[in-house]
Image (cartoon, rainbow, N blue to C red):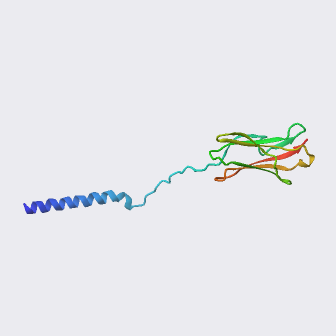
């Protein structure tokens, strides 16, 4: 009986060792772990509406000198920085469409022939992710 107990004990231990080895066998070779795609915790503001169309000529006439940008962003602190290529910062911007996650800014430029050929730029930033930049080449008619 003692020999049978010893044999069954050995079989049991051998079986446990084999199961353990078989369980670790897939990990012993070269294996590939698929990278986990992480969502950006702070995505950039998304364009909702822009006028005039970015990267096109913005025509300044005696009756139309406005440009605006409206974005959707989950953060509360979106800033709009308007500049002219030779005059620098445009301080006449006013907020528009600020409702929850929708935020916007508008600038009204003076009707001035000296603005002809300058580039109007609006940089949209939430301070946490990449900035978005819109540009317009100004044409005074």
Query: Which one is in front, 28 or 85?
Result: 85
Seen in the picture, residue 4 relative to 49 is either above or below; the reply is below
Q: Position of residue 38 (x, y in %)?
A: 54, 51
Residue at (43% x, 58% y) in the render: 31
Q: Position of residue 121 (x, y in %)?
A: 79, 49
Query: Which one is in front, 140 or 102?
Result: 102
Residue at (64% x, 40% y) in the render: 100
Q: The C terminus is located in which quarter? A: top right
Query: Which one is in front, 2 or 72?
Result: 72
In the rendered structure, the answer to whether residue 34 lies left or right of residue 119 reads left
Seen in the picture, residue 79 relative to 141 is either above or below; the reply is below
In the rendered structure, the answer to whether residue 33 lies left or right of residue 1 reads right
In the rendered structure, the answer to whether residue 10 lies left or right of residue 85 reads left
Q: Furthest-top residue in view?
A: 63
Q: Furthest-left residue in view?
A: 1
Q: Position of residue 128 (x, y in %)?
A: 64, 53
Residue at (26% x, 61% y) in the render: 17
Residue at (62% x, 48% y) in the render: 43
- The number of discs equals 0
Q: Position of residue 130 (x, y in %)?
A: 66, 53
Q: Find residue 67 and report its image quarter.
A: top right
Q: Find residue 98 and report its image quarter.
A: top right
Q: The N terminus is located in which quarter? A: bottom left
């Amino acid at each position: 009986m003692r020999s049978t107990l010893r044999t069954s004990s050995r079989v049991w231990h051998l079986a446990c060792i084999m199961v353990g080895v078989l369980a670790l066998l897939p990990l012993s070779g070269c294996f590939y772990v698929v990278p986990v795609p992480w969502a950006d915790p702070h995505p950039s503001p998304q364009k909702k509406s822009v006028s005039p169309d970015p990267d096109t000529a913005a025509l300044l006439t005696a009756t139309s000198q406005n440009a605006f940008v409206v974005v959707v962003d989950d953060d509360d602190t979106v800033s709009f920085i308007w500049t002219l290529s030779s005059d620098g910062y445009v301080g006449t911007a006013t907020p528009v469409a600020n409702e929850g996650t929708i935020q916007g800014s508008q600038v009204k430029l003076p009707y001035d022939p000296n603005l002809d050929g300058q580039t109007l730029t609006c940089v949209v930033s939430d301070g946490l992710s990449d900035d978005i930049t819109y540009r317009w080449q100004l044409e005074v008619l």
